[in-house]
Amino acid sequence: MKQPTKRARTRGKMSPIALGVALALAAPGLVFAEDAAPAAPEKSELNLDAIVVTATGNQKSKLESSISVTDVDSALVSALNPQTQSEIFRLIPGMIVQGAAGPGGNQNISVRGLPIVTGGSPFVQIQEDGLPTVLFGDMNFGNNDYWTRFDVSNRVESVRGGSASTLASGAPGAVINYVSDTGTKKGGEFTYSNGLGHDLKRATFAVGAPLSDTWRFHADGFFEIGKGVRDEGFQAQRGYQIKANVTHDIDAKSYVRLYLKLLDDQSPTWTSFPFSTSGSSNQIGGVSPYPGYDARKGSSIGVYNQSFGVMDVSTGQISQVSSSGIHPVAHAVGSELHYVTDGGVTLDDKFRFTQMSGTFSTQFGGYRATSDVLKTGNLVNGLPVNAIVYGAGPNVGQSYTGQYLVNNAQIYTNMKDMGSTVNDLALSDKWLFGEKAGALSARGGLFYMSQNIAQDWHPNAYYQTLEGTNPVPLDLISGTSAAAATLLSLNGTAGYNSNWGSCCARMYDMKVADTAPYIDLTYDVGSLQLDASARRDYIDVSGWAENASGISQKSLPTNFTSYNFSAAGTTFHSALVSYAVLDPATLEPLNYRFQYTSYSLGALYLLTDNTSVFVRASRGGKANTDRNILSGYTNPDGGLNSSGSQKTTDIVYQQEAGVKTRGSLGATNYGVEATVFHNSFSQSNFDLTQGTGGQYSASSYSSTGLELEGSLNFASLGLVGQLTWTHANIDQNATCNGAGCTLVSGTTGVAPAGTTRLTYMLAPTYTIGPFMGALVIQGQGKMAIDNNGSTAPGFTILDLTGRYEVAKNMFLGVSVNNLFNKLAINGQSDNNANGSLVTATALAGRVIDASLTVRF
């Protein structure tokens, strides 16, 4: 059908008060002068004319869409110079990113105060070009941020709430979409960067161009190698990504596109760091570096544990593996068809097949007093510990006298198969009823995704020194004389597959398929827009899971190793360690199906050509799959029992209202968007990380908040930023067992762990001649570190970027992250050894990089 002509846009005037709001609250959309920066987006006010391509059912601009949408372009990301993928998400209003686990992912990513009870990104879906990278964002050792890497030509588009519930699966909180360039303009760039004061070399490229009147291509990628921003003592960070697409324009409205992606990237990962604190063990006051371990630069891995032994959970054989952090390998091919018939009906089909696998390996933080290990009555592998000695390095065999030591899992997880097949097919049309009667747009589709989840886990019980550079494994000795002593750990390892109990020596091979029909209807009449969408997800789970049923001890054979106890001048030839292997009696078949419904209702009114207001109410679901295995939720035939049937889905209810406006005051252009929201969420789930063997829980939460974002452009000055205020609340928190659930005292009415009241970002840029400078100010208020009302201090950090055009299309740049080397806790506390030593996640300290960019 013939499309209605868009009304001409005019620029409204701005009051001084509105100008002040825009100056103080700006949004991603950083503007650089085209002749002074390697990547320069077009100047616009929040890019409100841009057509939304993420989680939407119709071709509407941001101004005319009744959802909260944010764009983050490559120029802003370049100014930020992110050291991890998740740092990009902090540029999006409403997002809360807990932790600084490293450049490879494994962050807890949430939105609008929705709590993360079991880790990962349970309510946030990460997409590449409109399709999810994985079906579930919170898979154990397979979070969605493992598999994505930002490239220099990507644009990130985020939809929070609203239609994310119905036009994506498992994303009631938000969808974050990495949108690729498609070669509409000829050109490219190459950048080489080198760490100053740290060892990391990185090369990025992007190139694209029309090949003819009907063909065009784009390719981009990176290669990196080095020790990383935290000196691991070996090349812990190395890898590459190549993405490419080629497009054939069938006619002016239709096209077909092919995609290719190759990713093989190894990055170190960390779970927590030690801090000295002036507060109590639960209420953190001021923080300072722990002696010998500066959380801004320290690491839990180094030359002495860059490889370690693991025991095969099936055969019991021990072999050496590399401590390669998060190491995803993904090979993907995809296609996209957009075809508009002569009658105006539009067919869209997106397809992708991905082979994914990899490994996860690191040393978890977790600190224990040395005296506690040595105290009378403490048994390791059934024997008392009489001495603790260095297991490697120049002090091997000498007594360890440090006050604390590291005592937590040294883990290796083999992600054998995380591949997927996904297809999203949709038909859309539009009917015009006349100028006064309006128009109806409809889009109906069928989404299908099959996700493989095949893993085996190896959590070793491990001891090492508490120091931030090249920590040394510690060996425990039982016996008061060398001749009669028994080693209770070997090169730090006291138990194979046994750290968290027999539950976590496990292997599973699952396939989860999601078939989801959906529909989206939009009715436009005059300045009013009404829309409604609904989705029905049918989840099929098949496969099996198996774990150990107990922990045993074994003496290693005399030919396995030898150990020099130099303090006594004696050589040991045996060791007693614990271990756990699979028990066939625990085999759990998986063969069940469940479904849930999501819906979203919205309305938008265009007050002027430059201002709109909207309201929306949504219900969205998120399926629980691999985190529920081996939890007693199935019958012998693989079907769900009554308890399991109640724990298949988490439902989020959300209401929001917002205003979007743009205008000008003289030569100053601005854009502002403000959204208020309220959501509620109930969860009945199993958390493997709590207690011994996991913990069942039943909890409910709610949150209310405000998101503000805006941009301002005046001559050579650009200003962008965002601010989010959130009040999150635990309405009820209970732990459960076979006898029922019991409320946890002291948790009702407090903020859930990992949430914060305030997050903000402000980025002014200035261009003068060949020089461009950008400052990114970002931070957060106090963060809840547990469910008992305890908090960690807030922080503000500054990132600084400068670029100078030394020759035409050649730029030298310097980027400084965390300019003032702020020591900042940005995630919930793992545990407290006592009142002066607190463990939590931390941002990296000052990081400086120099770069050379050539554009062509």
Image: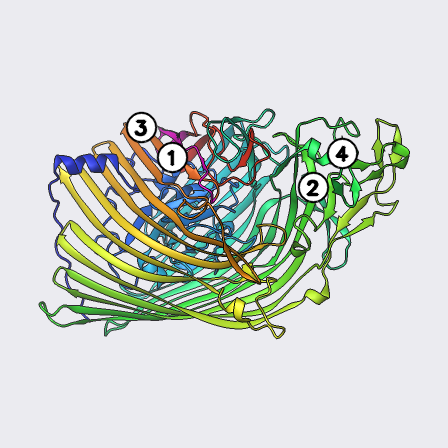
Q: Quarter of the image containing the C terminus?
A: top left
Marks 1 and 3 close (CB-CB < 8 Å): no
Looking at the rendering, the stretch of residues picked out in magenta corresponds to: 787-815
| Rendered location of residue 440, percent (x, y) | 20, 70
Disc 1: which residue:
779
Per the model, the C-alpha gap separating discs 4 and 2 is 12 Å
User: In this picture, is 674 found above or below 448?
Assistant: above
Disc 3: which residue:
770
Residue shown at 86% from the left, 42% from the top: 574
Q: Is residue 214 visible?
A: no
Residue 246 image-quadrant placement: bottom left
Question: Dot 4: within a 10 Å radius of its alpha carbon, few (fewer than 14), some, or many (20 or more) residues?
Answer: many
Foreground label between 4 and 2:
2
User: In this picture, is 45 found above or below 213?
Assistant: above
Per the model, the C-alpha gap separating discs 1 and 3 is 30 Å
Per the model, the C-alpha gap separating discs 4 and 1 is 41 Å
Marks 1 and 2 close (CB-CB < 8 Å): no
Q: Is residue 189 left or right of residue 3?
A: right
Viewer-nearest residue: 692 or 619? 692
Give the main secondary structure, helix, strand or loop, of the magenta stretch. Answer: strand
Disc 4: which residue:
391
Q: Earlier in the sequence, mark 3 or mark 4?
A: 4
Q: Is residue 577 left or right of residue 177?
A: right
Marks 3 and 2 close (CB-CB < 8 Å): no
Q: Amino acid at mark 1?
A: Gly
Disc 2: which residue:
462
Q: Is residue 478 visible?
A: yes
- Circle 2 sits in a helix, a strand or a loop, which is it? strand
Q: Is residue 388 magenta?
A: no
Per the model, the C-alpha gap separating discs 3 and 4 is 56 Å
Viewer-nearest residue: 226 or 550? 550
